[in-house]
Amino acid sequence: MNNNKVKVGVANKEGQLGFVFSRGGLREGSGRKSIGVTKKISLTLTEDMWGEIENHCTEHKLSRSEAIRNIIESFYTK
């Protein structure tokens, strides 16, 4: 039986919750480093286009976000 106790803790950043385990915990500066500002969007594409993106992601081992970010960055850096 695993007796790890889990508590929900409040991070130093407003509005964020985190899990606090019996060891370690929320630490300033821990975790994945930000590459920019996250904004949630909704994008409508055809099934075929979503299929192309999914295939590209699988072939190149990318997330959808990474693939779409690469497309946008390559468009605006020309």
Image (cartoon, rainbow, N blue to C red):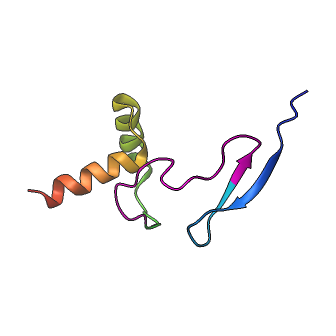
Magenta stretch bounds: 19-38
Residue at image location 72% in from the left, 59% down from the top: 9
Q: Is residue 7 above or below residue 21?
A: below
Residue sitting at the far right: 1
* 26 left or right, relative to 9: left
Of residues 24 and 6, the one drawn nearer to the viewer in this rendering: 24
Quadrant where the C terminus lies? Answer: bottom left
The location of residue 70, given as percent across then percent down, is 27, 49
The location of residue 67, given as percent across then percent down, is 33, 46
Q: Is residue 35 above or below residue 13?
A: above
Residue at image location 62% in from the left, 53% down from the top: 26
Of residues 55 and 5, the one drawn nearer to the viewer in this rendering: 5
Q: Main secondary structure of the magenta part?
A: loop
The location of residue 43, given as percent across then percent down, is 42, 63
Quadrant where the N terminus lies? Answer: top right
Magenta stretch containing residue 33, yes or no?
yes
- State the image quarter where residue 51 is shown: top left
Residue at image location 76% in from the left, 57% down from the top: 8
* 58 left or right, relative to 74: right
Of residues 75 and 28, the one drawn nearer to the viewer in this rendering: 28
Magenta stretch containing residue 35, yes or no?
yes
* 66 left or right, relative to 30: left
The location of residue 72, given as percent across then percent down, is 25, 57
* 53 left or right, relative to 23: left
Q: Is residue 62 above or below residue 27?
A: above
